[in-house]
Amino acid sequence: MLETLQHATNDHTVWVVRPTRSLTWQEARRWLCLISLIPLASGGLFLWFGAPFVLPFAGLEIALLWAAFYYVQWQGQWREVIELSAQALVVERGRHEPTQREEFDPAWVRVELEQRGRWRSSSLLLRSHGRSSELGSFLTDGERQTLAKALINALKKSR
């Protein structure tokens, strides 16, 4: 998902890039509780009929399902904040606060959208002075293309 924030002074533009996640953690927990009833009920039924070893595997299935949902929600918190001003193009990455920061000179930075092949997704790269940084690896090809066009247009206006 791509959000563009234009400041009132028009001296810099900020893009917030994050993965698209349709469920909040509260909604995911509700679905998980509902879905967890199925293996739990079947394990209880097998226990009733004298097959006690089905219930631990049902519990394992539920635990793995919860772990998978948690991992997807955790990955969905990733953010890339791209800020373009006349002095610098700054890329900050992280979940709740920036953990990585890269800075480029807007006069020298190149935005490249590389098509890797027929079956592989494209990659959006910022390149300057021998350094390269990939943006939006979690975006779809169309979203990456939209971000590339927006960055190129904003860089042309700032020069």
Image: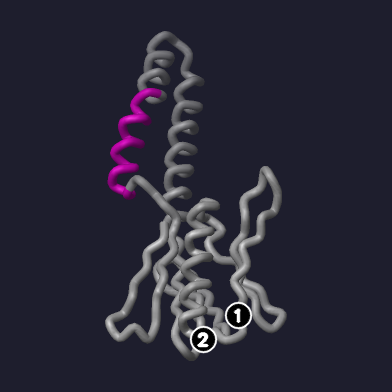
Check residue 118 for magenta coloring.
Answer: no
Q: Earlier in the sequence, mark 2 or mark 1?
A: 1
> Crowding near pointer 1: few (<14 within 10 Å), some, many (20+)?
many
Q: Which residue is mark 2?
A: 159
Q: Is residue 32 left or right of residue 107?
A: left
Q: Which mark is residue 81?
A: none
Q: Is residue 104 left or right of residue 25?
A: right
Q: Which residue is rendered at x = 49% and y = 90% of the image?
A: 87
Residue 127 position within the rendered picture, expressed as x and y whole percent measured from the top left: 64, 75
Q: CA distance from mark 2 to mark 1?
A: 11 Å
Q: Which secondary structure, mark 1?
A: loop
Q: Which secondary structure, mark 2?
A: loop
In front of the other: 9 or 58:
9
Three-letter residue code for mark 1: Val
Q: Which residue is rendered at x = 62% and y = 59% of the image?
A: 123
What range of the chain is rendered magenta?
A: 24-38
Residue 106 position within the rendered picture, expressed as x and y whole percent measured from the top left: 54, 84
| Quadrant of residue 43 within the rendered picture | top left
Three-letter residue code for mark 2: Arg
Q: Is residue 118 left or right of residue 24?
A: right
> Crowding near pointer 2: few (<14 within 10 Å), some, many (20+)?
few
Residue 140 position within the rendered picture, expressed as x and y whole percent measured from the top left: 52, 51
From what the image shows, is residue 33 above or below residue 97? above
Q: Which mark is residue 109?
A: 1
In front of the other: 52 or 24:
24
